[in-house]
């Protein structure tokens, strides 16, 4: 919410995304997770030069401001990595990278299709829709995710996969998602989860 400028209606449905934003605003919001909890200030120019390439003016971004607990940012990023590995954005796994995280979004009547996705050092948002509200007849995975995937394929071709930095106070546990406990050797289903240390399950199934 702090990353979105302007007024958004204080309604219960805001928790489900019932508000209109621009791609830049959404990118800035998701950058909070990608950066480990800090809100960046977007800027579009790095320098201005004359015809002789003499630098007339340079621009430096303001320092990102911490806005959420780094542990919460890491947990959300971990959940969004699951979206790419085995969720609605699984098609992006064709990139063969272990450092992708993201979130799909399709609005009412499929009028808008969004995908916000990132690595530890690069974030991109794709919106697909009409200037006048009209149904696309497509989900995000069909409309926006392919564009994002093609862009990231080119943009990350020379970038090695990186690990998202793990903040202090976070632990990884293999858990039984149904019973809410640490997975034992005979658990039929087990997944790895990340938890604040004080909230990690301690009982074995």
Image: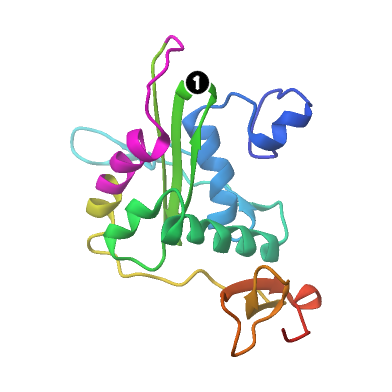
Q: Point out residue 56 in the picture as x, y percentages from the top left corner.
A: 35, 37
Q: Residue 200, how many percent across, how many down?
A: 75, 76
Query: Magenta residues, as a range?
Result: 132-150
Residue farthest to the top? Answer: 132
**Mark 1 closeness class: few <14, some 14–19, many ≥20 residues within 10 Å:** few
Residue 67 vertical placement versus 201 (above, below) = above
For label 1, the residue is 109
Q: Residue at x 78, y 26 (%)?
A: 11
Horizontally, residue 38 falls left or right of residue 199, namely left
Q: Residue at x 66, y 35 (%)?
A: 16
Q: Is residue 41 visible?
A: no
- 113 and 186: which one is in front? 186
Query: In which quadrant of the rendered view does residue 165 lie?
Result: bottom right
State which quarter of the image contains the C terminus: bottom right
- Can the viewer see residue 93? yes
Q: Residue at x 25, y 53 (%)?
A: 153
Name the secondary structure under disc 1: helix
Was residue 133 drawn as part of the magenta stretch in this picture?
yes
Left/right of residue 24 with respect to residue 13 in the rendered view: left
In this view, which residue lies farthest toward the left?
Answer: 52
Q: Quadrant of residue 96?
A: bottom left
Q: Is residue 122 above or below residue 135?
A: below
Q: Is residue 11 left or right of residue 25?
A: right
When the figure is inspected, residue 117 is found, relative to residue 200, above or below; the finding is above
The image's colouring method is: rainbow
Q: Residue at x 50, y 20 (%)?
A: 109
In which quadrant of the rendered image does the N terminus lie?
top right
Give the side of residue 61 with respect to residue 64, left or right.
left
Q: Position of residue 22 (x, y in %)?
A: 51, 27
**Frontmost residue, 85 versus 3:** 85
In the rendered structure, does residue 95 fall within the stretch colored magenta? no
Instruction: Indicate the position of residue 125 as horizontal and vertical percent values.
Output: 43, 40
């Amino acid at each position: 919410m702090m990353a979105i400028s302007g007024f958004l209606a204080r309604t219960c449905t805001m928790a489900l995304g019932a508000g209109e934003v621009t791609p830049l605003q959404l990118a800035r919001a998701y950058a909070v997770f990608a950066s480990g909890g800090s809100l960046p200030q977007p800027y579009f120019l790095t320098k201005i030069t004359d015809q002789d390439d003499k630098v007339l003016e340079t621009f430096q971004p303001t320092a990102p401001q911490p806005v959420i607990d780094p542990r919460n940012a890491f947990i959300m990023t971990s959940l969004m990595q699951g979206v790419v590995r085995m969720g609605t954005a699984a098609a992006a796994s064709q990139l063969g990278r272990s450092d992708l995280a993201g979130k799909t979004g399709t609005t009412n009547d499929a009028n808008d299709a969004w995908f916000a996705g990132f690595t530890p050092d690069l974030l991109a948002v794709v919106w697909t829709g009409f200037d006048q509200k009209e149904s696309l007849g497509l989900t995000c995975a069909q409309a926006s995710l392919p564009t994002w995937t093609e862009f990231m394929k080119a943009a990350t071709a020379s970038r090695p996969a990186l690990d998202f930095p793990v903040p202090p106070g976070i632990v990884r546990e293999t858990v039984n998602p149904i019973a809410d406990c640490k997975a034992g050797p005979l658990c039929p289903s087990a997944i790895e989860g990340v938890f604040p240390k004080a909230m990690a399950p301690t009982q074995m199934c």
